[in-house]
Amino acid sequence: MLLIRCPYCEEERPELEFRNAGEAHIARSPNIAGESDDDFEKFFFIRSNPKGIIYERWRHMHGCARFFNAVRDTVSDRFLMTYKAGEPKPAKLPGAAK
Amino acid sequence: MSATFRIAGAGRLKQAKIAGFSFDGRPYTGIEGDTLASALLANGVHLVGRSFKYHRPRGFLSAGAEEPNALVEIKRDAARKTPNVRATVQELYDGLTAQSQNRWPSLAFDIGAVSSIASPMLSAGFYYKTFMWPKAAWKNLYEPKIRAAAGLGVAPDQPDPDHYSARFAHCEVLVLGGGAAGIAAALAAAETGVRVILADEQAEFGGSLRFESGAKIEGQDGFSWAQSALAKLSAMDNVRVLPRTTAFGYYAQNFVGLVERVSDHLQSPGRDLPRERQWQVRAKRVVLATGAIERHMVFADNDRPGVMLASAARTYLNHYGVAVGRNIGVYTANDSAYAAAIDLKKAGINVAAIVDLRDNPTGPAIDEARALGIEVNFGRAVIRAGGKLRVSSMTVQPKNGGGERTIPVDAILMSAGWTPSVHLFSQSRGKVAFNDETKRFVPGIYAQDCVSVGACNGTDGLSATIDEAYAAGAKDAGSKPAKGTKPKVDASESWSRGMLGAAPGAGADATVKAFVDFQNDVTAKDIRQAVHEGMRSIEHVKRFTTNGMATDQGKTSNMHGLAIAAETLGKPIPQVGLTTFRAPYTPVTFGSIVGLARGPLFDPTRKTAIHPWAERQGAMFEDVGQWKRAWYFPKPGEDIHAAVDRECVTVRKTAGLFDASTLGKIEVVGPDAAKFMELLYTNPWEKLEPGRCRYGIMLREDGFIYDDGVVGRLAADRFHVTTTTGGAPRVMNHMEDYLQTEFPHLNVWLTSITEQWAVIAVQGPKSRDIIAPLVEGIDMSDEALPHMSVREGRICGVPTRLFRMSFSGERGFEVNVPADYGEAVWEALWAEGQKHGACAYGTESMHVLRAEKGYIIVGQDTDGTVTPNDAGLDWAVGKKKADFVGIRGMARPDLVAKGRKQLVGLKTRDPKVVLEEGAQIVADPKQAIPMKMIGHVTSSYWSQNCGRSIALGLVAGGRDRMGETLYVPMPNGVIEVEVTGMVFFDEKGERLNG
Ligand SMILES: [Zn+2]
């Protein structure tokens, strides 16, 4: 069971308090109704599914109930960092050099 | 029978406490503190089992958790039968009853041993080759026979009456293994004041100090030091000591699973004691002090009862006071077996000869053996063990060939060296490294905050072990420096390396059985054969031969198997690779995994406030998610059909009361509440007046229906949203997701109020007459309270949100009251209802009544691929809206294409025939199989009100097929149906105000 740091509660809590909510930083267009089929496909269906660093959304379901973003390495399952919803993709990752 | 192999003056057990026990029906006595193994050996019993594949007689190989052979069934009573218990681990208690396994009719004469004769057929890969043809024979003949003949113990045939508990624990330092290393590490860590947990799988701490007679620490013999150190640790508030506790799995971020065997060693465990307790420990740091496991020598017939590891024989003597024979042979490639010979010789046991494969080893152990007058042979191999049910001799030959000599013995002690126990380190995702000089895998690259100390780290000698362990325990553990002092080692034993792989006596020819893996009956020849048949990777060799795949996970066999494969391949060991270690380290009971999550505690049960009333009325219940819902209310003599027919007719004739409390309820509040509703539902909400309701549809972004429900606007900034019973949590999650991440600019609060309000639906022409006398402050006239409106007021003196709405097509109301008053208000409404001849109805009648009106149930008539248009609900989609979740998805080419499955009514030609829900629909019943299926039945009931069966179904291009005849092929014939509209009763909807 992983430990995940909730950026709102500001502490590490066990994985079973959280729920994954899919890839992060996929913005819903304010004019979604006018989007082309291709743009809608990119927005709704296409996900990166990387081997390595993934930016994803989690919800502290059985805690503060907030959604937040996390950077996780899909190879080691290690969480590199978490940050609040709405904050930009971090430019630098801790321990990324290793 | 007297325990004739118990040696007076040897061992640590107090003779005072005698324990009687039975094995295969014969009575024996042992001493409290014995294991079943030591007690049997004290009685001269070596033959305890039959092997998995060849049914060869087997005895004890070890004195610990690595035991592959001595698996027995322990029986407490008819329900408490535990198979595959390692006799070397099971502690003796008075009255213990054990039975051997995998033999018929008896242990000494076993018919299955015939498979030994047919063994060429059962060689490596036999699963994949011999029994593969013909195909049918595998299922009907080979597999049942193999399963019956091979195999371990028999699973219990009754539910487990014991209970199992579970604990979470946190600590700074978790020490796994309670030998000299683990104790030293725990002492150092504990003295810094941090929380320490020390666990060991044995009943007593000490590890190899149990047999190492040469160890002296702090002026005491090693085992006594361990006990006093443990007493000190146990007395400290910051230390938790867990004996009989196995760390079975090492997971991410220092999360370790342990199982504590709480009562398997007790004669009559109290009912309050769990059988086992599972610990889930999160540790800042883990100290692995898991020791090393001795390897056997690989030679012909090395599995005869009486052939065992040297350290096991030493443990039986030095700890339990039991000699494993009277005339012992030793076969070794390593010094540690000398110590066993020396201890036994000193206890008065004859040591016939030591056979050492090494050419000219030197050292104090060898000198001492010689000084005691033991015959020592160098450069020789034991090429065969004699005897069948018990070893009777060993045949010795110079290792490069020459004359044979057979020496009579009644036990052979062997040691090929020691394998560091890197199981947990490997489970932690650490990478092992091969030390070419010492020929062993030791921890290399760490993946987590843990450290290996002592023998599991390849550290030799007691002094070096304690130095390393004490330093590791103290390091970064706490803010205080360690107060105590490092335990001082006064004397210790030291062992050199040994060998890997097959000894000369393993034989190159096909008939020799030199076992590598005892539990899965894998021989040296099998491994060579696997390589000859093309297996190159050790993972392939393992699967082909099943080496290391038994319940002992190859604790004694993996390194030998690897070395033989490497030698056959002509490659160095690291290039062939080590197989991956996986949890559990030793088998774990299902009970300890399941813990308390059984029976009523498996899943929460949710009951409504009105549940007790329904129970008193004799309602039948059905499970809807975690909810128990009243299904129907049978009167005496009624079956479900009679009850539902009566309930449905009564609702339409007078009225019925229905417990709708399980419906999901969410309050959407705030200045932007209407804007939020506009975005989350297809319908328009801005212009809905306070006090009015609307049927809402929620889509996912892909344009498919996600949920539905009636929404009441209580005030400009307050909506009372209802959801489906099963959908409540995910709808709440869906709303929160959009509110928090896509529309955070909206000033809205969401609150789940499902459990705050009990909901009593009163439906039928008399519904207003039933409710009105109890209501205060609400004008109940049609003008003031029209269909689809909501008012707040009081009923029976308590607050209510009174909805005028209908899921039956009749005039109807849903009375929301605070859940605490639910049962009382229901009782009051029920009393009023009785005056009018109303009934209580359950979910089955609710389903029939709504289907008569063509009202859909999301999740039954829709399946996640149905759009509002498909369901005939286009009218509920706001045409002028610029945005809502699903607006773009709904416009995708496939979702607006012609020929989509649409929801329609279905009437069977024969009105008495009720279709089966889920049945497939075809246009031409005479077409060839597989037929083209154009839809399926989603809802189907007998309708007493219509006097016929009714059904809904999803049919391709359904709305263009009105009046068409379609077909439902069933096992008993084809059913003809007519495609109709979805409303079967009161098509004009006049009864809503009737
Ligand atoms: Zn939180």
Image (cartoon, coloured by chain):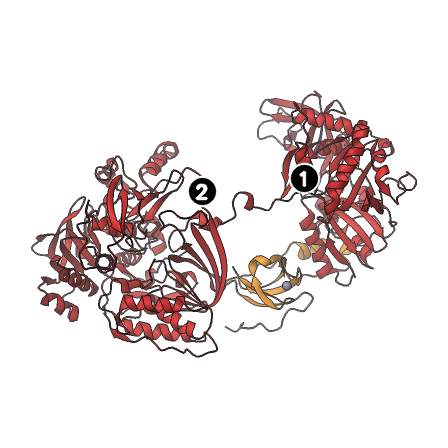
Q: Is residue B303 above or below residue B202?
A: above
Q: Who's the residue at 33% across and 36% down the image?
A: B148
Looking at the image, which is closer to me, B869 or B520? B520
Write down which quadrant ligand 1 falls in: bottom right
Q: Residues within 10 Å of mark 2 (few under 14, many from 20)?
A: few
Above or below B733: residue B809? above
The picture quadrant where one finds residue B398 is bottom left
Front one among B613 and B180: B613
From the image, which quarter does the C terminus of chain B lie in? Answer: top right
Apparent colour of chain B: red
Q: Which residue is mark 2?
A: B161
Relative to B728, B33 lies left or right = left
Tell me where residue B413 sits by quadrant.
Answer: bottom left
Query: Is residue B646 toward the left or the right of residue A77 in the image?
Result: right
Whether residue B455 is visible here, answered yes or no, is no
Q: Decide which of tag 2 and tag 1 comes sooner along the chain.
A: 2
Residue B592 location in percent, x, y? 45, 50
- Identify residue for label 1: B611
The extreme front residue here reads B16
